[in-house]
Amino acid sequence: MGELTLFDWAAISEILGMAAVIISLLLVVGSIRQNTAAMHTANDNFMYERQDAIVATLVTDPSLAALSVKHSNREQLSETEHVRMWNQLFRDMLMWELAFTRHKDGLLSPSQWQGWDSAYSPQFLSEFPPSWWAETRHWVSDDFAAHVDAVYAAASE
């Protein structure tokens, strides 16, 4: 093998350059995956903390816990009790909408969304009467309203 020509050196440089680009792209892909995982984790943590805060109100407020039992037993609520219960359930619904929106935006994995949705759907149907939903529907996004409408429709089949 003789001396390398300028053409040979150029070819070698081109191959090394291509290898460097491929390695750089692999590093970028790895970094994107790490950032995506970190974003999903932060999003999950936020949602669980938010849900914990909602549940904590039932744990720390005995009168709200008693009101929840009264509502679950379908007992008549006073106007004040109705407002308190409606707002508590509205907070739950907004949490469900947050999960829906985060999933739709790609910030919540399909399996995580399935978990949230399968937990909220039956709870919502059992605790949030259709008349309350009719009053509230316009306060949520159109996409989420369509999802809730589909949940109500599936339950009535």
Image (tube, grey):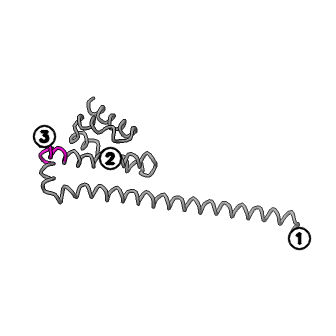
- Between 16 and 94, the one nearer to me in the picture: 94
Residue 51 screen position, x and y as percent = 29, 55
> How crowded is the residue under tag 3: few (<14 C-alpha within 10 Å), some, or many (20+)?
few
- Between 127 and 35, the one nearer to me in the picture: 127
> How crowded is the residue under tag 2: few (<14 C-alpha within 10 Å), some, or many (20+)?
many
| Distance from Cα at disc 3 to Cα at disc 2 | 23 Å
The quadrant of the image that shows the N terminus is: bottom right
Q: Secondary structure at mark 3?
A: loop
Q: Amino acid at mark 2?
A: Trp
Q: Badge 1 is on which residue? A: 3
Q: Amino acid at mark 1?
A: Glu
Relative side of 37 to 62, left or right: right
Q: Amino acid at mark 3?
A: Arg
Magenta range: 68-83
Residue at (79, 64) in percent of width and height? 12
Q: Is residue 72 within the magenta segment?
A: yes
Relative side of 50 to 76, left or right: right
The mark nearer the N terminus, 1 or 3, is 1
| Distance from Cα at disc 1 to Cα at disc 3 | 93 Å
| Distance from Cα at disc 2 to Cα at disc 1 | 71 Å
- In this view, the residue farthest toward the top is 157
Give the image quarter of residue 146: top left
Residue 60 screen position, x and y as percent = 17, 60
Q: Is residue 29 within the magenta segment?
A: no
Q: Badge 2 is on which residue? A: 96
Q: Badge 3 is on which residue? A: 74
Disc number lying in front (1 or 3): 3
Residue at (27, 58) in percent of width and height? 53
Give the image quarter of residue 54: bottom left
The mark nearer the N terminus, 3 or 2, is 3
Q: Secondary structure at mark 1?
A: loop
Whether tag 1 and tag 3 are in contact, CB under 8 A, the answer is no
